[in-house]
């Protein structure tokens, strides 16, 4: 993606199911879990570079001994900082008493992060905050081991105000109004309720307080706690948690908006946001790994028993399609093939855009994430050209000769590495004009690859959100090659609506497609539609979210997708650009064909999978009209 979009968080939960001595005997280290957590987090660093956090729980510790460890960082390399700090203590032990590095009892008493249960988190900040206190995992501490709660997640809830009021009605006094604190306190409240009910239950049976503590640890009903805590959540989430005595869980939203995958054997249970991460860390096949069912929780009890249970009734599956286009790592088997297919399906539109002049066309991609859709585009072009060759050969008939046949067979599609992304330049110049000039040079080109005023230049990007980088940098440098025409192809459809489920795309002004529609309404004497939509949004602003409609769709209804694409090309054409510019977007139908199991397409269609989505999009539109730059869900 040429536009920088901060997006989803990532989680990694790991439970070692054997005593630590087992891993020393088999793998030669007491830090098997810690080493695997580093891999699981580092392989998901694409999901969060604003901060990271790691928590660990040691099982069966004696009273008075520390059993929860946590480290968080917002440095430029947060994962490395966390593990460097942890390893520093282990290195000290190794220098002073090297034999103690395999003494499990000593390590658990004297070094942090030497327990059996881990929870890691990678953070992208969608709340506007980027301080250490905003980093997961969060702790809710208590002297009762079974009431200690550690929470981390990849999520955003749309109804924080409602949930905050629920906490107030429960008699709580939350320290801030945020979805993270709300989730922590909501789960924590029902964890407290469950503890109290079990305490009273066992008290009446004659158990003493110490015995009751052990009985509670065995009997906590995590399924019931999560059901009561999450029944009124509206949003996309993969929520993970650890309890102080050793239970753990990962809960996924009913529409499956945010991803979660898991694997279990007799040694470990692991959950991550991305499937190939588990494959890499544990050398597994994709068939070994399961996707956590929407609306379900994976519950790992202290005794190691793992179950997947329903918490909330699954709704129509709306797993995020943007995961497949851009956010997730492309080395997942399915995602890799889907991204290639997204490029391949664009061929009819591309051929039309260059008037079938394949012999005078050069194809490339905008680095770096569009590379896979580029491969698919080239495969589609190859197939198209092969059909043309076959027809040309048939047309020769009796006039076939070696020379004519050779001329047909040697036709090829031309592809080049056109755009090169340089290391980020320091924008130390404060004057705005000079800064824009610096931004324009973030990309560079390969000179001599295009025949001037003769070739069409086709470059594919995975998505076009704002178009800022295209206008300020990429198009300007491509124009230096002096092609007859530049065609920018997006493997994603037009992004028209904000996200409210964990992606930092929350303001209408951020979308070039929205800007284009607004301009078209004004140009064609239909500006009254803007006022009508604002009035309708305002009228239902105080409605319950279940009754709210997405009226922002009416902004786009008067126009075809091609009309909006044409206007986008006008808006993105830099001053002084000589080449003709055309923008080609993926169709919704092709998106669904390429990503059949991830049809969460609200970015493109406005079809939000939860009622809160409609509330957020209308609020975002009202903010736009009123000049309010706040996020619609904050």
Image (cartoon, helix red, strand yellow):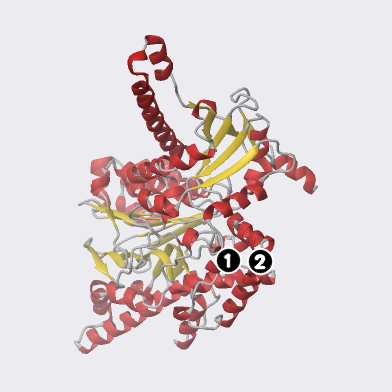
Q: How many marks?
A: 2
- Residue most toward the top? 402
- Between the C-alphas of marks 2 and 1, the distance is 20 Å
State which tag comes first along the sequence, 2 or 1.
Answer: 1
Q: Nearer the viewer, residue 447 or 261?
A: 447
Left or right: 598 as drawn, with respect to 358: left
Residue 555's disc is: 1
Residue 7 position in % (x across, y down): 51, 55
Left or right: 438 as drawn, with respect to 486: right
- Residue most toward the front? 398
For residue 143, say whether it is visible: no
The residue at the point 41 percent across, 29 percent down is 385
Residue 220 position in % (x across, y down): 27, 75
The residue at the point 37 percent across, 10 percent down is 402
Q: Nearer the viewer, residue 76 or 508?
A: 508
Residue 629's disc is: 2
Q: Residues within 10 Å of mark 2 (few under 14, many from 20)?
A: few
Q: Secondary structure at mark 1?
A: helix
* Of marks 2 and 1, the one in the foreground: 1
Q: Residues within 10 Å of mark 1 (few under 14, many from 20)?
A: many
Query: In the picture shown, does residue 232 fall above or below 574?
Result: below
- Are the residues flagged by discs 2 and 1 in contact, CB closer than 8 Å? no
For residue 228, say whether it is visible: yes
The residue at the point 48 percent across, 64 percent down is 606
Query: In the picture shown, does residue 245 fall above or below 55?
Result: below
Q: Secondary structure at mark 2?
A: loop
Residue 251's disc is: none
Q: Nearer the viewer, residue 160 or 477?
A: 477
Query: In the picture shown, does residue 31 fall above or below 409?
Result: below
Query: In the picture shown, does residue 441 fall above or below 81?
Result: above
- In terms of image quadrants, where is residue 330? top left
């Amino acid at each position: 993606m040429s536009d920088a979009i901060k997006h989803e968080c990532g989680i990694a939960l790991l439970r070692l199911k054997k005593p630590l001595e087992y891993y020393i005997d088999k793998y030669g280290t007491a830090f098997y879990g810690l080493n695997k957590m580093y891999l699981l987090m580092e392989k998901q660093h694409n999901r969060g570079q604003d901060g990271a956090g790691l928590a660990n729980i040691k099982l069966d510790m004696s009273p008075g001994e520390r059993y929860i460890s946590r480290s968080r960082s917002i440095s430029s390399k947060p994962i490395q900082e966390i593990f460097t700090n942890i390893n520093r203590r282990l290195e000290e032990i190794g220098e002073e008493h090297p034999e103690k590095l395999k003494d499990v009892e000593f390590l658990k008493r004297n070094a942090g992060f030497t327990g059996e249960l881990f929870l890691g988190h990678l953070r992208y900040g969608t709340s506007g905050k980027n301080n250490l206190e905003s980093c997961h995992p969060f702790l809710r501490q208590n002297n009762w081991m079974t009431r200690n709660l550690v929470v981390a997640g990849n999520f955003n809830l749309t109804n924080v105000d409602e949930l905050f009021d629920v906490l107030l009605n429960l008699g709580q006094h939350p320290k801030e109004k945020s979805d993270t604190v709300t989730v922590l306190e909501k789960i924590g409240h029902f964890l407290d309720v469950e503890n109290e009910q079990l305490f009273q239950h066992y008290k009446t049976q004659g158990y003493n307080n110490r015995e009751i503590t052990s009985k509670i640890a065995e009997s906590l009903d995590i399924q019931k706690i999560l059901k009561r805590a999450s029944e009124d959540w509206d949003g996309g989430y993969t929520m993970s948690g650890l309890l102080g005595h050793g239970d753990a869980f990962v809960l996924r939203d009913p529409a499956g908006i945010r991803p979660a995958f898991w694997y279990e054997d007799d040694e470990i249970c692991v959950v991550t946001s991305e499937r190939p991460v588990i494959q890499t860390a544990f050398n597994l096949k994709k068939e070994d790994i399961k996707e956590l069912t929407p609306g379900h929780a994976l519950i790992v009890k202290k005794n190691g028993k793992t179950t997947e249970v329903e918490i909330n009734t699954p709704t129509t599956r709306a797993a995020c399609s943007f995961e497949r286009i851009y956010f997730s790592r492309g080395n997942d088997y399915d995602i890799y093939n889907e991204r290639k297919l997204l490029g391949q399906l664009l061929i009819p539109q591309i051929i039309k855009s260059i008037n079938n002049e394949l012999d005078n066309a050069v194809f490339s991609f905008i680095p770096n994430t569009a590379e896979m859709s580029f491969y698919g585009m080239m495969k589609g072009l190859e197939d198209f050209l092969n059909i043309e060759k076959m027809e040309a050969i048939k047309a020769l008939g009796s006039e076939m000769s070696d020379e004519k046949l050779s001329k047909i067979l040697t036709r090829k599609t031309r592809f080049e590495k056109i755009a090169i992304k340089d290391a980020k330049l320091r924008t130390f110049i404060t004057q705005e004009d000079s800064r824009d000039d610096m931004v324009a040079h973030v990309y560079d080109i390969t000179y001599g690859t295009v025949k001037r005023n003769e070739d069409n230049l086709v470059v594919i990007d995975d998505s076009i959100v704002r178009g800022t980088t295209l206008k300020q940098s990429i198009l300007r440098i491509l124009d230096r090659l002096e092609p007859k025409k530049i065609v920018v192809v997006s493997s994603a459809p037009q992004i028209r609506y904000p996200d409210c489920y964990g992606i930092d795309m929350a303001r209408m002004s951020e979308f070039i497609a929205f800007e284009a529609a607004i301009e078209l309404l004004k140009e064609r004497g239909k500006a009254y539609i803007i006022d009508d939509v604002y009035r309708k949004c305002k009228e239902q602003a105080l409605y319950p979210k279940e009754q709210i409609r997405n009226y922002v769709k009416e902004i786009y209804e008067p126009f075809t997708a091609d009309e909006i694409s044409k206007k986008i090309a006008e808006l993105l054409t830099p001053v002084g650009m000589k080449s003709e510019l055309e923008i080609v977007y993926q169709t919704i139908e092709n998106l669904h064909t390429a990503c059949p199991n991830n049809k969460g397409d609200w970015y493109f269609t406005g079809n939000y999978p939860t009622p809160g989505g409609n509330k957020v999009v209308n609020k975002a539109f009202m903010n736009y009209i009123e000049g309010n730059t706040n996020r619609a869900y904050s």
